[in-house]
Structures are given as C-alpha cells and as structure tokens.
Amino acid sequence: MASVFSFSSLYTPNICSSSSFYKPIVAKLGPNQSYWASIEADIEAHLKKAITIRPPEPVFEPMHYLIFSTPKSTAPALCVAACELVGGDRAEAMHAASAIHLMHVAAYTHQHMQIGPGPVVGRELGQPGVELQYKELGLARINEPKIVHKYGPNIELLTGDGLMPLAIELLANAMSPARKNSDKILRVITEVTQSMGSKGLVDGLYREVEWTRSGGENEELFDYVCKKKEGEIHACGATCGAILGDGNDEEIERLKKYGLYVGMIQGIINGSIGRNYNKKRMEKKVEELRVLAMKELNTNFKGKKVVRQIASLIEDFGVSIKL
C-alpha cells in the first residue's frame, strides 16, 4: 500500500471545504522514493558539490546556510521534471534548477530580512515588535515557513545580492562545446534573468506592497502580483527544463503556460498576500487556473510517464487528466 509524503515546500490546501483550506498537499508514494523528493535530493546534492564552505568563510558560511535552510520553491523541481517530460535527461537540467533555487533564495532572503528591534538570532515573525515592522511595510505573512536568522540584516542583504551572479555563473559553467549547448544555455540565462528581474519577481514584490497598502480591493493588481511573484518563476522553471531537454516549440510553450498557472495557484493560496483576500474569490480563481493548467498537459509529450507526476502538483484539486 502506498504511503503518504508531505511535500514540505508546498503548503497547498484542499479547497473543497473551508475548514481544510490551508492543508499541506500530499503525494502518493510507491515502494521507491517519491518522484519529487528524488528531484529535490538531486538538486541539493548538486548544490552541495558546487557551493562549498571555503575561504573567505565570512562570505561562504552565510551563503551556504541560506541556500540550504531557506524553504524550497517547487520551481526548481518543475524545471527538472519538464526536462524529463520532453525526453531529456535529468542531469541536463540540474544547473538550471540549481540557479533557479539560488534566485529564489536571494528573493526570499531580501523579503524576509529582520528589520524590527531586538536580537536577530532565533527571532520569529510573530513575536512583539517584529510583526509590527512587517505590517508597516504592508507585508502580511501568516503561517508561512520561517527561517532562523543566524546573521544580521546587513549580512543577509549582501549575501542575497551575491547569490544572483552566482546563479548566472552556475549556468555559464554548464556550457560545453562537446555537447554544443551554448545556445540553449544562453536562452536559459535570458529566461532566468527576465523572470527574476525588474519586470519579473522584483516587480511583483513591489506591487505586493502597493496592493496591501491599498487595502486589498484591487483584484487585477492581486492577480498581477501572483503572476509576477510565483507564476513567472515557475513558468521560468518549466521553460528552462523544456529548452534543455530539447523540447519543440509547442512543448516549451505548453510547459511555460503550465508553470505559470501552477505558480499563480501557489501565489494565490500560499503567498503572503493570499490570506488577506476573499476566499470565495480565491477558490474560483484557483479552479479556473487548474483547468487551464491541465489542458496544457493534454498533448503527446515524449516522457509520458512523467505527465502524472507533473500533474500531481494540482491534480489533488479535483481536475483530472486523460492519459
């Protein structure tokens, strides 16, 4: 009998009843390790090999800590799964998945820096003084995974800045004349920088503050923030995986849209702004996005065995796919 695995980085609810609205998503496991857990393990192993603690320690120790303690996004794992879905080998997407994780860590670190009074180490968001400071920024994060702050905001700020060029370096190191993959890597670098830059996630972070301070009445702005913050990094992950796996134009476009919808669902339900919004409106929007996402998987991908695993990111919401 299959066991149950709680996908630690994805706090996705079953929206069938309001009482279970914030329920962690679960995936069924067979006798072997879960598909998603195996991908995450491979990405972590790749990062530990690529990024070690070395001199100067004051630079690499906090970098190493943040990389491996920050709550995970599903975008890097989706990158690997998309590569396999179009018939590619998992190893081909490992550099890109690692780079996307570093970009996620940089954004998470900047957004979650401690700015309230008092000691930094071990302090959590809900303690007196800290939540007030975040509220002044217009950021409401309820029940979100937390990270223990071993370093001050000055170190976190500079380390987050350093992670971004490091991510690009990882991608550049993946170029291989023997494999003739330079064009694909350049496309991936473009996708990553666009999704994380001033017209991508950074724009979403800014608009989030604007939306929250406005009182949360602007539905179009709400959707825009979810698209920019979570939607585009997941679209980037799926697109990069499909490119590196030699997917055709249709496959790349379908997976890009699928990733966008998956990310927007996560942004609506799990994001820091989602819990301030009308639940009925969220349920309706999530349902619409689920249906759109599942339609993008209804095609003849080369890696047919992976379709079910990728669909599991949203299948628990009640939409099925005919294989």
Image (tube, grey):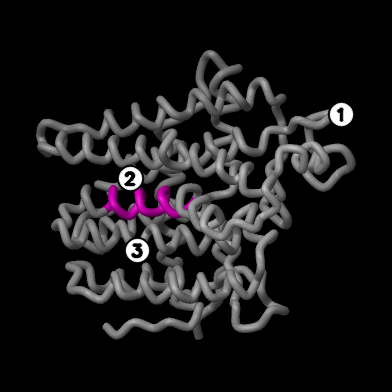
Residue found 34% across the figure and 82% down from its top: 321
Residue found 41% across the figure and 53% down from its top: 234
| Mark sitting on residue 248 | none
Instruction: Answer with left or right where residue 137 lies relative to residue 206.
Output: right
Instruction: Answer with left or right where residue 96 lies relative to residue 9.
Output: left
Labelled pair 1, 3 in contact (Cβ < 8 Å): no
Residue found 26% across the figure and 60% down from its top: 84
Residue found 49% across the figure and 52% down from its top: 224
Mark 2 or mark 1, which is nearer to you?
1
- Earlier in the chain: of badge 1 and badge 3, it is 1
Q: Tell me residue 277's x, y (percent).
A: 66, 63
Residue 64: within the magenta? no
| Residue 242 lies in quadrant | bottom left
Per the image, the residue denoted by label 3 is 258
Q: Residues within 10 Å of mark 2 (few under 14, many from 20)?
A: many
Mark 1 or mark 3, which is nearer to you?
3
| Mark sitting on residue 118 | 1
- The kind of residue tagged 2 is Met
Depth check: give the residue in front, 38 or 261: 261
| Residue 31 lies in quadrant | bottom left
- The kind of residue tagged 3 is Tyr
SS of the residue under disc 3: helix
Per the image, the residue denoted by label 2 is 94
Looking at the image, is 99 positioned above or below residue 222?
A: above
Depth check: give the residue in front, 214 or 29: 214
